[in-house]
Amino acid sequence: MDYQNLLIENKERIQYIIINRESKLNALNKDTLSELHIAFSEAFSNPAVGGIIITGAGPKAFVAGADISEFASFDVAQGTALAREGHARVFDLIANGNKPVIAAINGFALGGGLELAMACHIRLASETAKMGLPEVTLGLIPGYGGTQRLAQLIGKGKALEMILTADMITAVVAHQYGLVTHVVCPEDLLTTAEEILQKILQRAPLALASAIRSVNAGCADGVDGFQTEIDEFGKCFGTQDFKEGVDAFLNKRKPEFKGQ
């Protein structure tokens, strides 16, 4: 597909998805969200792609929020539909994806931008990054999973403080909160993301997908995460990757996983 708002780059089994609206600080508009849906759907179904790194173009912003002009005149029904569609087509799609997704936060991650990063499985930040959910300054609340994922990641008290004050936090504070796992200098951001993802990609692909589903189940309302873990654990025994992993371990060699 010929993307207008994204750059797609492949580096061996890693696919980069770069939001390419630098002049708009990579803000999420309707077209960009639509392209993200297509790009992630294709990446998750492409056997040549093992994992994804998402970042923003330029040094200033990962994603500095949503394009407010697009929904300034919406009524209740339209606002509800906006959030519901965004959840289903982009944010939940990423969170529930069958391949690991790393957010490389290279600058401002505000509003929908921070929600996009939180939908990813792992988050790294540049030392220059700043994060926040400023929606209450517009008379809104986060609508793409921010109230739920932020509380799951950093706890209810800190999440409420961030959301209710609308204050930005630095990358260092985000690391202290547990919102990001690493803070690095800007020039090392993508290298570090690649190093982590390359390590992950040495593991069994089907087991990675099972692990993502099991961890997510523990955060899902009305789902028994322990039972999901039991089920996913059992399924692993029916894979060729399990047989390969055990044989490699017993024979002291490096496994060659096929995702089967």
Image (tube, rainbow, N blue to C red):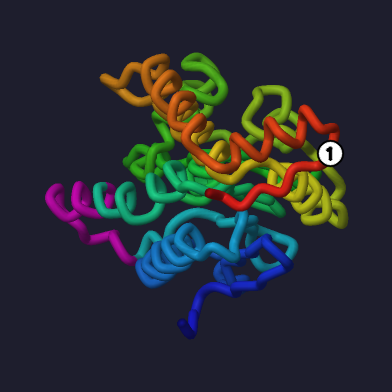
In this view of the protein, which residue sits in the foreground, 212 or 60? 212
Q: Residue furthest bottom?
A: 2
**Callout 1 crowding tier (Cα within 10 Å): few <14, some 14–19, many ≥20:** few
Q: Main secondary structure of the magenta part?
A: helix
| Secondary structure state at the residue bearing disc 1 | loop
User: Which residue is under mark 1?
Assistant: 253
Indicate whether 212 appears above or below 87.
Answer: above
Q: Is residue 79 magenta?
A: yes
Quick check: can you spot residue 163? no
x and y percent of residue 181 in the render? 71, 33
Total labels: the figure holds 1
Q: Position of residue 147 (x, y in %)?
A: 40, 30
Residue at (84% x, 43% y) in the render: 184
User: Does residue 120 belong to the magenta stretch?
Assistant: no
Left-right relation of 16 to 212: right
Residue 69 percent location from the top left of the image: 35, 65
The single residue placed furthest to the left in the displayed view is: 77
Q: Is residue 226 left or right of residue 10?
A: left
| Residue drawn at (19%, 52%) of the image | 81
The residue under the point 26% across, 19% down is: 222
Residue toward you, 166 or 10 = 10
Image coordinates for residue 34, horizontal then vertical, percent: 37, 67
Which residues lie in the magenta part? 70-83
Q: Nearer the viewer, residue 53 or 125?
A: 53
Foreground pick, 245 / 247: 247
Q: In the image, what residue occupies the spot 66% across and 72% down?
A: 9
Q: Is residue 238 visible?
A: yes
- From what the image shows, is residue 36 above or below residue 193? below
- Kind of residue at badge 1: Arg
